[in-house]
Image (cartoon, helix red, strand yellow):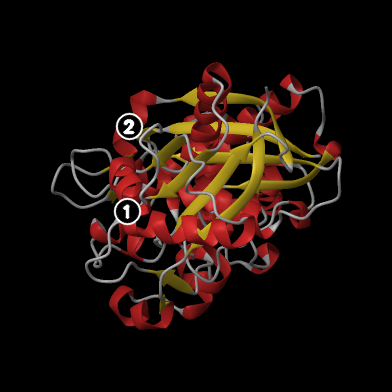
Amino acid sequence: MSKVTLDDIVELFDEAGIESNVSELDPKKALLDQGLDSLDMMNVFFQVEEKYGLSVGEEEIAAGDWNSLEKIVESVNKNQQ
Amino acid sequence: MSVGIVSVGSYIPKVEDCRTKLDRHDVEESFIIKKTGFVGNSKMEDGEKASDMCVKAFQSLEEKCGTLKDKVDFLIVCTQNGDYLLPQTSALVHSKLDLPQRCAALDISLGCSGYVYALNVAKSFMESNGLQCGIVLTADPYSGIIDIQDKNTDLLFGDAATATLLAENAAYELGKAVFDTKGADYDALLCEHGGQLYMDGRRIFDFVLRHVPKSISNCLELNGIGTDDVEYFLLHQASRYLVENMARRLRVDVSKVPFVAAEYGNTVSSSVPLALENYFDVKPGATMVLSGFGVGLSMATTTIQRI
């Protein structure tokens, strides 16, 4: 299975209709600190689960494993191994 | 005989401005406008009960249809926040409206999916028993069970009631409906006896986006039509964000999936009939989809066609 890239996650954000200008987001910074809100994050987790067939657990979310673009890429690739 | 929807009346109590809640929940007004979508949340008057809201909705219906109460032979109230544990709230409504004794009166315990269920129960019951004048009432005041400190729910829900007249010589005929239940997820939206409402927002969000589009497509297939044949999708007004994302999942223009509840909130089983009342006057032959989904977890979708 090919590795998921930052571009793949940016495209997923576009498909999810997240309003923020995704290409301008800092990949390392927490998304909630860059204008996204809790509903946006629910949508992101849903889209990731649908597209990659994995489960985004509450414990991982609380641990910050899914809180930035970079972390999302890492977590998707880790879950797909 | 075949009964259909003749008309819809409603009652929406006084609205509380969302701006009174911003500080309490540490949210920006933009979040409410763009995401939850509810700039106001309607709330029953002190001392008012579900049956009182039903009476007012019925009176609104009579303003449109003329005097009905001497003719009513079937009454169903969709509520999970009735006046008492027993008797059924429809008995209170029957009393307050002084309806004829020869009248069936029952409650149906469903939330956001309840209107589509209640329409089908009413239609089947009436046609099986040759009944002529049925009233489908929805009134599920969550204001009595909301924890005002809970941002998940306090910003969403509103109280309202609707009354739908079912009879022959209708304006709309009902199509075939699809009903789904995910009982294993019952605890995603829960209120214990004497308790307050609990909602797992993420589980509800996932449930809606994952399962409701399939319920709708199954209903369209059952009725032999596609999304292009539908004038409007009148969905449960869970939030602006969910309704807009449903349009995306259905791959239809957002203009066909209206969000009408901004002024008063998510009114549970009254949500879909309030949307229908708003969009009642479509052209003859137009088909609409009614879809309710939520507590249970439960989904129900039907088509209706303007005659």
The foreground one among B197 and A21 is: B197
Label 1 crowd (10 A; few <14 / some 14-19 / many >=20): few
Q: CA distance from mark 1 to mark 2?
A: 34 Å
**Left or right position of B252 against A33:** right
Determine the secondary structure under disc 1: helix
Residue A63 visible? The answer is no
- Above or below residue B168? Residue B152 is below
Which three-letter amino acid code belongs to the residue tagged 2?
A: Tyr
Which three-letter amino acid code belongs to the residue tagged 1?
A: Lys
Give the total number of marks visible in the rendering.
Answer: 2
- Quadrant of res B24: bottom left
- Above or below residue B160? Residue B23 is below
Residue B131 visible? The answer is yes
**Left or right position of B33 against B223:** left
- Above or below residue B29? Residue B163 is above
Q: Please tell me which of labels 1 and 2 falls first in the chain.
A: 1
Q: Position of residue A73 (x, y in %)?
A: 55, 45
Residues beneath discs 1 and 2 located on the same chain:
yes
The foreground one among A73 and B29 is: B29
- Quadrant of res B165: top right
Q: Position of residue B287 (x, y in %)?
A: 79, 39
Q: Which mark is residue B96?
A: 1
Tag nearer the camera, 1 or 2: 1
Residue in the image at 54% along x and 40% along y: B292
Read off the residue under disc 2. Answer: B186
Label 2 crowd (10 A; few <14 / some 14-19 / many >=20): some
Q: Position of residue B108 (x, y in %)?
A: 38, 34
**Left or right position of A37 against A2:** left
Q: Position of residue B250 (x, y in %)?
A: 72, 40
- Above or below residue B16? Residue B228 is above
Determine the secondary structure under disc 2: helix
